[in-house]
Image (cartoon, helix red, strand yellow):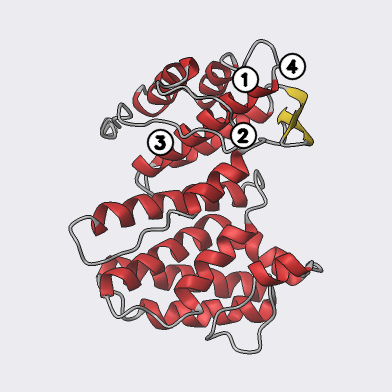
Amino acid sequence: MASTRPPPVDLSGLTSSASPSSSSTEISPPSHEAAILRSLSATVNEPETTASSAAESLDKLYPASGDDVGAVEDFLWSLWSLLVGTVKKIPADDGRQKLLVDVVAGLRQRRDQEVELWGQKTRVWTELPMLGPCMRDAWNLRPKLDGSDKDEAAIREWTSLNSFAARMFGADLQPWVNLAIWELRSALEEAPPSSTTARDAGIATVCEWIAHAGQQLHRQGLQPRTLDAMEERALKPGKLFQGGDSGLSQARWRFWRERLAELGRDAGSAELRERAKTAAAQMEELESSGT
């Protein structure tokens, strides 16, 4: 029996934001934006497109003059902004989430070219420069759920973004432990919102992190690293994790597991209750195995 083809994803409404340090005053989209969108659209809509061919297509769009720092910065910011926009349109449980992660992994194999951005030397594509700041921008747009008709779409996009971030972290493509801790802290270490919809949204994103990055999170928590003052503040525990330390730890992992199991039992749907139960069991298994 033939597999069902996933529904098409319309990227026509996506636009990239300007790089924070860009001096461009252009009102119209940069010339490379349309080409990036065509490549991303082919990636998620054309079954014959592979991660390798998609990575090759995007790499060919990289500015021919790698010495033009402004052009490189604008291109990278557009690429990552549009990728993030694409990710948010792909359901968290859709196989194209993994495909996009594989595309990013494929890009890392395409070139290893030094460039200076924002006063620091980095390497394209090896270090995936500017992807981190672009994701931070997206994270700052965490939806404020207010019970309106827009909540459902906002939750869907936020869950998809978390799924992508978790997959990237789990695949060791980005060191996004901060994104993981912020999301799990919000959902598990603070008093739950009164709204079942908002509470379930937090449970759903936690399940994505455990499913796709649980092993990585647990492993790093077994050997906590020394944090600087800024990290101590950024990765601090929430109000319910009293006396806990910043960063990852075995104690924090246990708290997360117990809290997820507790909240999951009261989730608003049988499907989410089962997902939370599965995630908590996965956490317990990792804890027992010591991996």
Can the viewer see residue 291?
no
Q: Secondary structure at mark 2?
A: helix
**Which residue of the protein is positioned furthest toward the left in this rendering?**
149
Mark pair 2, 1: CA separation: 23 Å
Marks 2/1 in contact by CB < 8 Å: the verdict is: no
Q: Are marks 1 and 4 in contact (CB under 8 Å)?
A: no
Give percent across and percent down for residue 248.
Answer: 68, 70
Tell us which disc is closer to us: 3 or 1: 1
Q: Amino acid at mark 3?
A: Thr
Q: Is residue 37 above or below residue 254?
A: above
> Which residue does the image show at 67% across and 22% down from the upper left?
110
Residue tagged by mark 2? Answer: 105
Q: Which residue is mark 3?
A: 86
* Residue 17, numbered circle: none
Per the image, the residue denoted by label 1 is: 71
Of labels 4 and 2, the one closer to you? 4
Give 177 or 130, whichever is nearer the viewer. Answer: 130
